[in-house]
Amino acid sequence: MRARPQLVPRFIAYGVKHGLKFALPTRLVVSPQRLPTGYHGSPDGRYIIVVSHTVFSKEGAQQVMNESAKYVVTIREPASCFESMWYFRHYEMKFDMNLSAFTKASQYTWAQERELNTIAYFWGVKIPATVQQKARCIAGQKG
């Protein structure tokens, strides 16, 4: 299933309709206009719904979610996710190269590496350099 921008508003509408307590990130990525006026979160610090792009942490979720909370996730195919991020974050302008040239580059600038590390983090990669090293090793073994 490919993630669609419409999913977030649908989950928000569902949560508002049913009076669910939302866990929101520190930096609000959810449009405040979609939440009820005066929304201040949960008085007990426990939540029923999270609607956000997030890096999932089971331990972190268990600390803030009600024990009866159910988990629904939309997982995107990595290449289409990267392409979507490329255009959404305007990397073509930031890096002064198109996506095709970027994928064929043999070296990246410090700024490009920083952005790639951020993307890797959101994909759940703990140490991007380790992944790059393993990829090079595998490529060398196949070569």
Image (spheres, grey):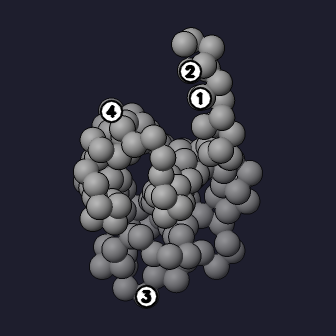
Say which amino acid is labelled 3: Gly
Disc 3 and disc 1 in contact, CB within 8 angstroms: no
- Mark 3 = which residue? 38
- Secondary structure type for disc 2: helix
Say which amino acid is labelled 2: Ala
Q: CA distance from mark 1 to mark 4?
A: 27 Å
- Secondary structure type for disc 3: loop
- Mark 2 = which residue? 139
Say which amino acid is labelled 1: Ala
- Secondary structure type for disc 1: helix
Q: CA distance from mark 3 to mark 4?
A: 35 Å
Front position in the image: 106 or 55: 106
Disc 1 and disc 4 in contact, CB within 8 angstroms: no
- Mark 4 = which residue? 1
Residue 39, above or below 129 = below
- Secondary structure type for disc 4: loop
Q: Earlier in the sequence, mark 1 or mark 4?
A: 4
Left or right for 134, reference 106: right
Q: CA distance from mark 4 to mark 2?
A: 30 Å
Mark 1 closeness class: few <14, some 14–19, many ≥20 residues within 10 Å = few
